[in-house]
Amino acid sequence: MKKYKDIVGDGGSNVVAQVGEQQARLKRRLDAVRFVVAVVSGKGGVGKSTVTANLAASWASKGWRVGVLDADLNGPSMAKMLGVRGRPLAVAGDAVDPPRSATGIPVMSMDLLLSSDDEPLHWRAPTQQEAHTWRGTMEAQALREFLADTAWGELDALVIDLPPGTDRLATVVSLVPVLAGVVIVTIPSDVSQLVVRKSITVAREEKVSILGLVENMAGLFPGPDAATLAAEAGIPFLGAVPFDRGLSLASDRGDPFVVTEAAAPAARALTVIAEKIRDGLERRPRC
Ligand SMILES: Nc1ncnc2c1ncn2[C@@H]1O[C@H](COP(=O)(O)OP(=O)(O)OP(=O)(O)O)[C@@H](O)[C@H]1O
Ligand SMILES: [Mg+2]
């Protein structure tokens, strides 16, 4: 049996050329996007996906061309929150044509590739132990495919919804050299802020611009306020989004809350946050 070191070059698979072609496609797609924005938080369940969906819907309703990439491969929620679950993916030339939300947002998510509600994502590997070893690499490869092989078209903003975990940003940075910045989400609790401080450190280490901090579920817990955290960290505080059952129900229905219930305080807060980020991005040259 041949060992890997006995194989000359790529063993005839032409894998080097294939990767090169994919990277060229990725660059071409991202060249058509003015700003790539990632929504992050080391902490889970604080509302990253809710903020992503509503930033995107708010911008789209004001005339920006916006796409959403769900980078949460194991717990994808963007297709549900943007109302495109179950829609077929059409293949158009060398790319997949993503479904569009009611506000015209193209959405790419692992959820659109899994065949049933209950099916989790399994990485194909000879053994589960190997799948564990290669998980990070396989996740990065899946995201690279989503970026390179989706017909995003010309966009003002591509918003990337990240899974929880402070290490995830590094993967996105390695794939998207043109990242315009990150929006960091926290909730008013010591536990959340403890983890979110690490997210701020990671963003700095990765030399990514921090567009600002959002406090979500404001008023639900009596914890520390995020404005203080932002001031201490020297990053912009974008605003506080109150806890609102209506926002959660709208997400479950796939409705863009900022559009359908625009007068609600949570929708107004999200709209102001979206405007602040957009104004900041519009004022700078393309990254
Ligand atoms: N301001 C809010 N008011 C009421 N419910 C909210 C609010 N923000 C988020 N939620 C609800 O809280 C739950 C978690 O939100 P979401 O899925 O956006 O968090 P997440 O940070 O993306 O989670 P994960 O870390 O699993 O990706 C959802 O059911 C969502 O509808
Ligand atoms: Mg999420």
Image: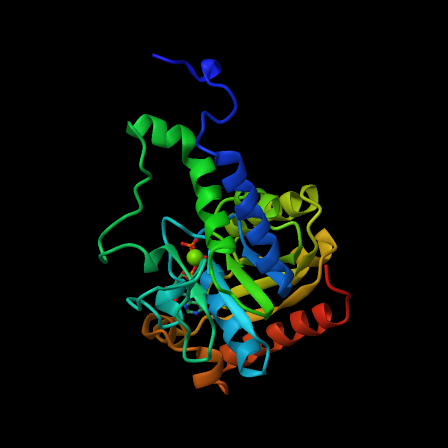
| 267 and 282: which is toward the camera | 282
Q: Quadrant of ligand 1?
A: bottom left
Residue 170 visible here:
yes
Position of residue 99 relative to residue 111, above or below, is: below
Position of residue 207 relative to residue 235, above or below, is: above
The coloring applied to the image is rainbow
Q: Residue farthest to the bottom?
A: 263
Residue at (22% x, 57% y) in the render = 116
Residue at (38% x, 71% y) in the render = 251
Q: Is residue 274 left or right of residue 147?
A: right
Quadrant occupied by the C terminus: bottom right
Residue at (48% x, 35% y) in the render = 15
Q: Is residue 227 left or right of residue 73?
A: right
Residue 111 image position (x, y, % from top left):
33, 58
Residue 6 image position (x, y, % from top left):
46, 13
Q: Is residue 16 left or right of residue 34?
A: left
Residue 87 image position (x, y, % from top left):
31, 69
Residue 261 visible here:
no
Quadrant occupied by the N terminus: top left
| 244 and 65: which is toward the camera | 65
Total marks in image: 0
